[in-house]
Image: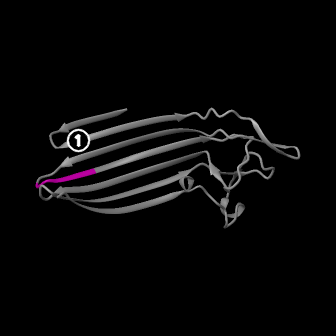
Amino acid sequence: IRVVANPIAKLSIVGEYRYADNEDNTPIVAYNQISTTRFTTQATSREVNSAKLEATYRFPLAFQGMAGVGWTSIDRSYTPSSSYTGVSAVRESTDETSWWIQVRRSMTETLSGSIMYTGSSRDGSNWLAPSSSGVGLVTVSDPTTQLGPNAIYIPTLADRDRNKLRFLLNWMA
């Protein structure tokens, strides 16, 4: 869903919401057995909600200012009978909030530039680590001490605070 409004002549406001439900219909079947432990295929479904609110204002002298805020939430499901090897921990959900502010200017017909500052913060649910039986996942309350310094995490699941400053100069010949 996307809504665009121009409440006054030089102001544009955009609001957007997106929803995606990626249902993994992989059949869950046994593929290996070690002693009495059976391993199955894995189905990982994701539900993604995201929203954005952005305002753009056209100032005199060909300046344009933009500010916005965004939010993304991802919920994942994991197969309890699967083996999770090669990674130390996963998460069922992550939430990320971001914001940005930008100033742009067209200086000539062929030259324009912008300065943008963005920030974001991501965190999520408790970490889930492979169980000691080799099948399924168990909750980890403190990954630093329980998983050790050599733990392998999927980067898109990690807590993160990010700030970025970007300069752009565009020349069209």
- Residue 86, horizontal then vertical, whole percent: 68, 56
Q: Is residue 12 above or below residue 90?
A: above
| SS label for mark 1 | strand
Q: Is residue 136 above or below residue 26?
A: below
Give the image quarter of residue 117.
bottom left
How many labels sit on residues? 1
Please tell me whether residue 64 belongs to the stretch shown in magenta: yes
- Residue 12, horizontal then vertical, whole percent: 23, 41
Give the image quarter of residue 41.
top right
Question: Which residues, given as a range, are shown in magenta?
Answer: 61-66
Q: Is residue 96 left or right of residue 38?
A: left
Kindly report the secondary structure that dominates the magenta region of the rendered protein. strand
Q: Residue at x 48, y 49 (%)?
A: 96
- Residue 120, horizontal then vertical, whole percent: 43, 55
Quarter of the figure that contains the N terminus: top left
Q: Is residue 119 left or right of residue 28?
A: left
Residue assigned mark 1 = 12
Three-letter residue code for mark 1: Ser
Q: Residue at x 33, y 48 (%)?
A: 68
Which color scheme does this rendered protein use? Answer: one colour
Give the residue furthest to the right. Answer: 35
Q: Residue at x 38, y 62 (%)?
A: 164
Q: Is residue 1 above or below residue 31?
A: above
Give the residue furthest to the front. Answer: 173
Quarter of the figure that contains the C terminus: bottom left
Q: Is residue 57 left or right of residue 118?
A: left
